[in-house]
Structure formats: C-alpha cells, structure tokens
Amino acid sequence: MIKINGDYLEGGGQILRTSLSLSAILGKEFEISNIRSKRKKPGLQPQHLTAVRAIAKICGAGVKGAELHSTELNFHPTAIKGGKYIFDVSEVKESAGSVSLIFQTVALPLAFSGTDSHLILRGGTHVNWSPCFEYLDEIFLPTVERMGFECELQINRYGYYPIGGGGIE
C-alpha cells in the first residue's frame, strides 16, 4: 500500500487528483491522509469527492473515506473501463466544483482503457483557482495530443461560482 501525506507543500487537492489518476493507471492501491489539511475548508469538498467517485467508477475501485469533508481515503483500483459516463458535482452538493479538475483526474486513465469513452461533466466551468474550459481546450488538450491522447471537447453550458450548473462533454 502506498501511503501519501496530503499536506505536502501547499497541501491542496492536486495531490489527491494525481494520486487517483496514477493509482488507476498503474493499478496500485494507496492511502492518503491529511487531505487538503492546509486549506480553509480541509478535507474533500464537492469537486474532490466527485473526482473520487468518478475515477472509482471508471476503474471499479474499492474506496473507504469517500465522503464530504473526509481527510483520509483508501483507494483500491481494478481494471479501467471506458464507456459513457456522467458525473455531476451537484449530486454531492450544489456547487461550482471545477469540471476541468475532474476532467484532468479521469481523462488520462480513460486513455488507457483501450476503448473510446464519452464523458459528460457538470459543475463549474469558470471558477477561481481552477483552469477554465478554454484552458483545457486550447492548452491542455493540444499538449497531451502530442503524446497520443485523442479528445474532442465542447462546452454545453457555462457554470460560475457559486452555483455551477455548467457542463462539458
């Protein structure tokens, strides 16, 4: 079991998102503690919990600690399965949780599924401290496409703080 301290450096959600993606791709289980402990609102917030649930569904993971405000999580992935998925931050709590950050958590693992996938992500498309949709479309995707990642993105509805309600596909 890989053990990760989530308060390393600035102690934000990126440690969690990267751990989830790499765990799914490599098939390695991990345990993370002190999730976002240096933040004003520590633990899993709606966008983080949505990312955990999303990647868990994609790779059939067993998960302990996947609840709002949790500061500890155990994640046990199995095989990544491509397909059609819909993930909505408002299923956790009405929020402008960043769909871009959720996308960055699940997109690369889905590239390893061996099949095409279709994602619909709902939440915030333009929120503070997160890359906006245009960043994904114009910066992130062209960069990973040079590595062989193929993806088309579209925005269905813009979503802003505090409610979100936006969507990308």
Image (tube, grey):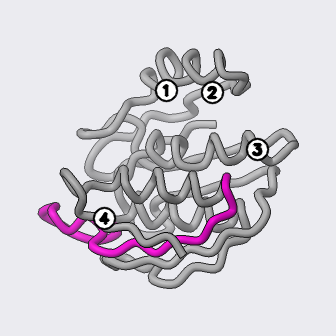
Question: For mark 3, what is the residue?
Answer: 112
Label 2 or label 1, whichever lies nearer to me, is 1
- Is-magenta flag for residue 41? yes
In the rendered image, which quarter is residue 28 located in?
Answer: bottom right
- Which quadrant of the view contains residue 92? bottom left
Q: Of callouts 2 and 1, which one flags the residue occurring earlier in the amino acid sequence? A: 1
First of labels 3, 2 by sequence position? 3
Q: Is residue 76 left or right of residue 81?
A: left
Q: Nearer the viewer, residue 133 or 59?
A: 59
Q: Residue 159, how many percent across, how many down?
A: 40, 40
Q: Quadrant of the N terminus?
A: bottom right
Crowd rating for badge 3 (residues with CA inside 10 Å; few <14, some 14–19, many 20+) = some
Residue where numbered disc 1 is placed: 136
Question: Which residue matches tag 4?
Answer: 6
| Magenta segment | 25-44
Calculate the distance from the C-alpha at mark 3 to the C-alpha at mark 2.
18 Å
Indicate whether 139 appears above or below 57: above
The amino acid type, in three-letter code, at marker 4 is Gly
- Marks 2/1 in contact by CB < 8 Å: the verdict is yes
Q: Sequence order check: which comes first, mark 4 or mark 3?
A: 4
Q: Is residue 1 left or right of residue 114?
A: left
Task: Give coordinates of residue 7: x percent, y percent.
Answer: 23, 63
